Structure formats: C-alpha cells, structure tokens
Image (cartoon, coloured by chain):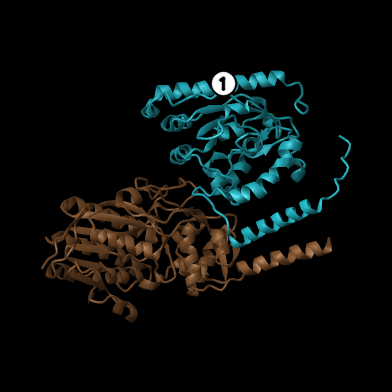
Chain colours: A cyan, B brown
Amino acid sequence: MREPEPEPTPDPAAWETGLEQLLAFARRRLSGDYTVDEFGYDRDLADSLLMPAVRPLYRKWFRVETIGMHNVPDTGGALIVANHSGTLPLDALMATVALHDDHVGHRQLRLLGADLMFKLPVVGELARKNGATLACMPDAERLMDTGELVGVFPEGFKGIGKPFRDRYKLQRFGRGGFVSAALKTGVPIIPCSIVGAEETYPKIGDIAPLARLLGAPYFPVTPLFPLLGPVGMIPLPSKWYIEFGEPIRTDQHDPADAEDPMLVFNLTDQVRETIQHTLYRLLSQRRNVFLG
Amino acid sequence: MTSSRTTSSGTKPSVVLVTGVSKFLGGNLAARLAADPDIERVLGVDTVPPPRDLLRRMGRAEFVRADIRNPLIAKVISGASVDTVVHASLSSTPASSGGRTAMKEMNVIGTMQLLAACQKAESIRRVVLKSTTAVYGSSPRDPALFDEAMTPKELPSGGYAKDAAEIEGYLRGFGRRRPDVSVTVLRFSNFIGPRIDTVLTGYFSLPVVPTVLGYDARVQLLHEEDGLAVLERAAVHELPGVFNVAADGVLLLSQAIRRAGKIAVGVPRGAVGPVGRILRGARVVDFSPEQMRFLNFGRVVDTARLKENFGFTPRWTTVQAFDDYVRGRALRPVLGAERLASVERGVLSLARLLH
C-alpha cells in the first residue's frame, strides 16, 4: 500500500461542475432525454454509470496492462477475437474498459453474447445498454458494416466454464461464423489474448444437478464459492494482461469467399493459433499470478 | 370515364375497396382516397358503420355494410368492378372484436373469403394487405433487426401474430394463382399518434405503467400519419412485395415511459401473466400474450427496403412520433420536464448557498 495522498483542496468551480453534471445526468435519465441505437446501446448510461462502475476493478483490482493497442484501428469496423475464461465474463468487461479508456480512439467494444444472457433479467438488459447484442450473423455483419468495433469469444461457454486444470488451453472455436462475417464485410480480425481472467474464479468443481435446476450451463465451485457464500463471489485479485495482436486482413479476399469452408477453417485456425501462442508467451513471462 | 393516367410505377386505380373503415386507418385511408379526383369510386366495407365524424371525413367514399366472411362480398367486388383492394381490417385486440374466437374468425376466415372473391373477379389488379411486424415474434434469441427475408425464431403460438402469419400465407397462395395481380404486404410496427387508439396508446396513458422487471424492450413505432401515407401510396402505385414499415430509431420501453412522464412499476416475469389478465379483465388495457412478449423483449425491423424499393421515408422518427402522441393526448405527466428542471435549479442554488 502506498501512502494515502493528501486530500486535494476542493476547487469550488470543479465541485460545482461535478454537481451540475450529476444533476444534468439525473434529469436526462428521469425525463428520458437520451438516444439509444437500434441494438439498444445506451451511450449516456454506459459512459456515465456503467463504465465508472467497473473502472475501479480494471485499474485497482486487476491492474490491467494492455499491450499492442496500436493494432486496433482508430476508426472503422474491426473484429476482436479473444479467449474466454474465468467462470463469469469479467474478461468481456475488462476488454471493454481497455478499448474505451486506453485506446486513442476511445472505442466502444460491441460484444456479441450468447442468447442465454439476453434471456436473463437485468443481465440481458444491462448487456444491451452496454453495447452488446446477440451473437448471430445478421447482427455481427450489421455492426461491422457500420464501422463498429465488434468483440467475440468464439469458445463461448466451453471456454468460460472450463475447469481450472484446463486454464489457458483454448477450446474449440465454434463453426467459424465470426470469420465468415469478417470476410463478408472485409474488416480485419484482431486476435486478443487475455491473461489473468482464469485465476479470478478458479473453477475446481461443477454441481451439475444444481446447474440443471437453474437452467445454467454450469454451477461453479471455486475454493471460496459456495463455501463462503457472497464473500466467495469476490474475484481473486490476479494481475491481468490484455494483448492485441497483428490484424489479420480479410479485404484481399472476395466477400463470396465467406462461403468457402476451407478458407474459413484455415483463417479460424490461424486466429486460434495466434491467440494460443500469445497466451503461452505471456504466461512464460509472468512470474506471479497476483503480482505479475 | 376511367382515368388511366399512367404513373411511373403503374396505373392509378379507378375503383378501390377498403376493408375495416370503422377503424382509424381504414376510415382515414378511404377519406384520403376519396379526396383524390383521379379515383372514380371508393368503397369502404365494415361490419359496423364508422363513427359519425369519420364518416363525414370519408366524403364521397361509399360505406358498404358487409361482412367479409360472407360470400356476398364477391358480389360487391364484381358489381362495382373493383380493381384495387386494400385489406386493412386486421384486428389485434380481441376485446374490440368480441373475443378471441370472433377475432380469429374475422381475421382469418374473412381474409380467405375476401381473397376467394378477389380470385374470381377479373377486374382485380392490385391487393394491399395491412400486416404486422408481430409476424417476426419476439424472443431473446432474435437478431437486433429483422429484415423481410427473416423468419421468426419461435413461431407465434396464437393471437394476432399467428393470424397475420396465416393471412400472409393465404395471400402468397393467392399471388401464385393470380400472377397478373400485384400483391403488396405491408408489415407495420406498432402505431402511435394523437388520434389512433391502440393497445400501446392505452398502455402509455396508464398512470402507473407495469413493465417486466429486469427487462427493457426496444420499441419501434410508426406515426399514424406515416402509416396512412404508406397505405395510400401502396393503393395508388404498383409496388409489389413485402415491406417492413416502421419509423427510424428506437426507444427503450423505460425511456418511453419517462418521456410520457409516467412511473414504471416492474412486475416479476412470473407475475406478468396474471397482472395482464387482471388489466384485461378490468378493461383497462387489452393485453394479449404476444403483446406482453413484445413488452418483454421488444422488436426492431430493418426498413431499408421501404426506403429504397417502396420509395417512402417516414417523416416522424420513433421519438418524434411518441412525443407527438404525448403532446396530442395531453398526457398528464407525473414527473414533468419542467418540474425536473426546477428541482435541478433548486438543488444547485441550495448547494451553492450551503457551500
């Protein structure tokens, strides 16, 4: 722990602007005076409330370090493909904060989520307001066509719900739908490797009957959960690294190549291998899970 | 004296038959067509006469009290040599049509009879159907936007949406049997506006508005005047095909309720059914299960085809249409914008004073 910084003398002007902004935000929210896009992304809420809520987790708890941010274009469509882990999708949230805060273009990551998420109350609502939409071809193509930065976790539940002993071993990459969508729209694919998320909730067991009862893909058992109850839901403070790799161009292919299964499989494998190798390299450089 | 003035997209109709003229859209469409001097005759059909002021507005349009479920409708069509039929009578509210059975009968059997009559009539050149975007259903597995080529993830199990899907099927069959007839299907989103009465206009005027707890549906609307303009354009020009008709932009349900100055009350999903039934039983708002699904998950459609192929861009966005409805109905806001602004000023000056 560092020495607590001396309290800065409150500047009356700054204090007043802060209050003014807060009140203006409250008034906008209460009178419905904000715009939402067709996917349900509520920028006013995301920037003023959701982002500040997860930022402390990003800065103070996981102390996320980003590498290769220059590989993400400042404008225009692109597809970020990342590994998925950690029982709860904190990696999706941290990647969103990283691109919003640490990228020069302050880009909003538009995540593609599983349908289960949109079925859930509150979670589905907040996900849409934070820019996510259902992982399906029409939505992915529409977002990429309009120059958005789209984020996808092709491993899905197989990745996020894998046992702790399989940490940092990439699971199967679905059917490569994300590659087809990128080929169709001609946007670059940026491999993204996230280290640290596996250790937030080490999943050492799975209570399958309980999962079936709740309709969930798994019911995790971690060293602290459900043993310690709600306290067990606090993620372990692992040190995180998020590395964005060299973009893989898709615009030299014909959009019709999206139908070519061989090309789609090859590109899918290329992305998967790149992420897997980057993960191994980052892990070999890491000396301590919690200190980095 | 048939007026056969050729437009860029076909000929103008000379005898138009409009169904459902006792309702806002049918009646006002008949009125608009009657005001067009190029159209020789306008026949308005319904089982009940339109309200007096609507009938007056319909001017020279002739009201024919007929039931489209009755084969007599064939006599009306052939007797007047109708060349264009605008089928605008599809009902979405069981209560206004005397129960769900009667509604289904009116919607489905009525359309079958009407199409059978059209198939026999040599004079028919154009059929326009007022359908609904409800045919896409509403579920958490939906893509963000539906285009006309997409099919619902879960087939509508009943109600208005199922009726509309069946009717569209009959119309496709009709189009195959009469390839010389131009068939236009207009899938409208929910209407809103100061004059039209729909389930949604009733819903938003409740003092306390029930919503599904933990869900915030994306709602896309269409201003009543834009709806009329689209129906008129489809009746007057030859624009075959299926078109989504909706305004640009979306509102979240919570946002719409706030813009109307109302207070939303979240109802847990399990209790939504009983609450809906109570409101329906008390004749407050006529919620059907598919409307409750819509208020749960929402629905947005892609209108590129409407703009590019149909040649129509709605004048009102969803937000503008909704605000026009709030102003036009003079809804009494519980939380008005002025009151909020004055509270904001009050808190600021109080804070400055204390500082």
Front position in the image: B106 or B54? B54
Q: Chain of mark 1?
A: A
- Residue A71: x and y, percent? 58, 26
Q: Quadrant of the N terminus of chain B?
A: bottom left
Q: Is residue A157 left or right of residue A289?
A: left
Q: Is residue B213 left or right of residue B165?
A: right
Q: Is residue A41 left or right of residue B221?
A: right
Query: Which residue appears farthest toward the front when viewing the image?
Result: A13
Q: Amino acid at mark 1?
A: Thr
Q: Mark 1 packing: few (<14 Cα in 10 Å), some, or many (20+)? A: some
Res. B21 image quadrant: bottom left
Res. B268 image quadrant: bottom right
Query: Which residue appears farthest toward the bottom when viewing the image?
Result: B52
SS assignment at label 1: helix
Residue B303 seen by the camera? yes
- What residue does disc 1 label? A274
- Looking at the image, residue A54 lies above or below residue B91: above
- Looking at the image, residue B330 lies above or below residue B323: below
Front position in the image: B321 or A177? B321
Which residue is found at the position 48% from the left and 46% from the top? Answer: B141
Which residue is found at the position 66% from the left and 44% from the top? Answer: A51
- Residue A145: x and y, percent? 45, 38
Q: Is residue B119 left or right of residue A151?
A: left
- Residue A150: x and y, percent? 53, 36
- Looking at the image, residue B329 lies above or below residue A1: below
Q: Quadrant of the C terminus of chain B?
A: bottom right
